[in-house]
Image (cartoon, grey):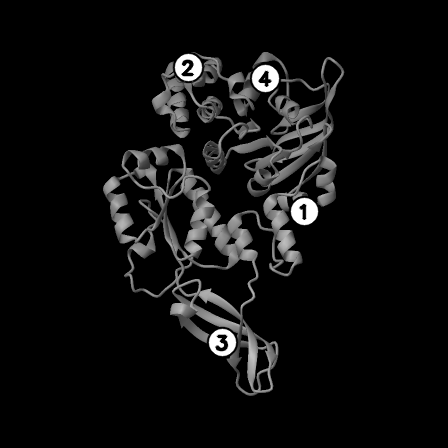
């Protein structure tokens, strides 16, 4: 379903500067959309048009198929449904306290006092700032201010959330926390639209990308479609995402499988094509190109997992009956990832899981989960890029625990499933303290089975 649409959109500033011209786009409901382009390409102006802050010089914008109207009542409804978070949070935060600032939007919508309190408290809880509700916003860090601005938008319960350069001026940890929030809102059905000149972010995150240059859309499509087009990127003054650039280089050298374009480090690692050769005795009748089953190796001969099933492709057969083969290893028992929903948090339960589940790697996603871990002295191995790093650890045989809450549990589970489906590599995964339980907690340590998701 198309939720936002522009037709022949044009905007000219009072000084005659053309900021948007001939813009026709369709944005689908529930998707993650990235507008990518250099500074000055028109992204910020477009966002102000999509929110009704600016009125087009020409053309029209439609929300759910209905053209924008610019009277006060109509604009109030537009801004309730389409929230915007500015690049500079200080442009959006002005009230004496965090609570009052987040309450500003709902108050203008005419909500009752009870509903305002409910919406504000829920929004602050979602962004992990409940304990700062009485604090002046200018006393907060850059990342905290950004979360206040997001909470102010979320308190109005919009269907579409627009974020102009959401990670601008944030440190890596704060940026990761903001992306966790954005992903959680999307999981619950919000359409998310961001602007960025960070091609790496757009490539790994977005469902659909619009490429902007000189006030126009010059390309659009899935991230892979857009960022594989080197000529289009050159026209936009952008470079390829780092992951894709590395992949193309190693693929050209015959070191990677050309099955798909990786977006994340685990996906990139999975494309690598290791060449491991060995001399073996082969029975009569074996030909070059045949596949052999060499059985199971362990100990010093198993390089990636405790036990490995070894298959081999015959590359060359010597006259003495021996052959050079390329080994292909597959771990019989990989590690796993356990997800813990901190909405139902219990420290004794966590301690039991760490002990019984033989957990060796712990991460936390979302401010609430990180605060709980810090308060209870739970040692965290990772607090940013948690899903990808846990996948890498699981591939090395580690058993990982991810502490997170609400929709982020489902988001993480979806990401892990997608990786398993694409890679064909199986490892254990489960959700504890929900109806789903983690199977490995029920199994004995000696169980040789590898579970599928």
Q: Quadrant of the N terminus?
A: top right
Q: Which mark is residue 100?
A: 2
In three-dimensional space, the C-alpha distance between marks 4 and 2, rounded to whole angstroms, equals 25 Å
State if disc 1 and disc 2 touch (CB < 8 Å).
no
Where's residue 434, x and y in %? 33, 45
In three-dimensional space, the C-alpha distance between marks 2 and 3, rounded to whole angstroms, equals 69 Å
Q: Residue at x 56, y 86 (%)?
A: 321
Q: Identify the residue position indicated by label 4 in the image.
A: 74
Please, is residue 184 above or below residue 97 in the view? below
The image quarter in which residue 383 lies: top left
Q: Nearer the viewer, mark 4 or mark 1?
A: 1
In three-dimensional space, the C-alpha distance between marks 4 and 3, rounded to whole angstroms, equals 70 Å
Q: Earlier in the sequence, mark 4 or mark 1?
A: 4
**Front residue of this view, candidates 412 and 354:** 354
Q: Identify the residue position indicated by label 1 in the image.
A: 228
Q: Earlier in the sequence, mark 2 or mark 3?
A: 2
Q: Residue at x 68, y 37 (%)?
A: 238
Mark 3 crowdedness (10 Å alpha carbons): few <14, some 14-19, many ≥20: few
């Amino acid at each position: 379903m198309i939720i936002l649409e522009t037709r022949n959109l044009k905007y000219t500033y009072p000084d005659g500067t053309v900021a948007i011209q001939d813009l026709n786009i369709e944005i689908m409901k529930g998707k993650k959309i990235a507008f990518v382009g250099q500074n000055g390409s028109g992204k910020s102006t477009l966002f102000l048009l999509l929110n009704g802050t600016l009125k087009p010089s020409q053309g029209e914008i439609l929300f759910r198929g209905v053209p924008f109207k610019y009277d006060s009542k109509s604009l109030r409804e537009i801004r309730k449904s389409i929230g915007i978070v500015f690049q500079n949070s200080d442009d959006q935060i002005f009230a004496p306290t965090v609570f009052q600032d987040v309450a500003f939007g709902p108050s203008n919508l005419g909500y009752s006092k009870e509903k305002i309190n409910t919406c504000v408290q829920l929004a602050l809880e979602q962004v992990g700032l409940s304990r700062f509700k009485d604090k002046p916003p200018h006393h907060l860090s850059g990342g905290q201010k950004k979360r206040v601005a997001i909470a102010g938008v979320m308190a109005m319960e919009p269907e579409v959330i627009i974020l102009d350069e959401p990670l601008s001026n944030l440190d890596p940890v704060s940026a990761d926390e903001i992306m966790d929030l954005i992903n959680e809102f999307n999981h619950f059905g919000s359409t998310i639209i961001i602007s960025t000149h960070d091609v790496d972010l757009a490539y790994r995150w977005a469902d659909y990308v619009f490429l902007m240059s000189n006030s126009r859309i010059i390309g659009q499509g899935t991230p892979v479609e857009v960022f594989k087009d080197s000529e289009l990127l050159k026209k936009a003054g952008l470079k390829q995402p780092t992951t894709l650039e590395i992949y193309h280089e190693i693929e050209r050298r015959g070191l990677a499988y050309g099955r798909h374009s990786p977006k994340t480090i685990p996906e990139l690692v999975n494309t690598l094509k290791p060449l491991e050769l060995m001399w073996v005795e082969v029975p009569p009748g074996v030909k070059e190109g045949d596949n052999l089953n060499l059985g199971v190796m362990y100990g010093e001969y198993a390089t990636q997992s405790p036990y490995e099933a070894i298959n081999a492709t015959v590359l060359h057969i010597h006259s003495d009956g021996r052959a050079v083969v390329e080994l292909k290893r597959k771990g019989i028992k990989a590690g796993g990832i356990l997800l813990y929903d901190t909405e139902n948090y219990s420290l004794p339960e966590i301690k039991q899981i760490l002990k019984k589940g033989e957990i060796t790697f712990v991460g936390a996603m979302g401010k609430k989960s990180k605060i709980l871990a810090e308060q209870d002295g739970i040692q965290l191995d990772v607090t940013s890029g948690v899903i990808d790093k846990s996948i890498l650890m699981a591939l090395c045989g580690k058993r990982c625990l991810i502490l997170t809450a609400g929709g982020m549990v489902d988001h993480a589970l979806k990401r892990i499933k997608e990786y398993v489906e694409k890679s064909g590599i199986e490892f254990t995964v489960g959700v504890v303290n929900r109806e789903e339980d983690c199977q490995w907690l029920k199994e004995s340590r000696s169980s040789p089975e590898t579970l599928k998701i």
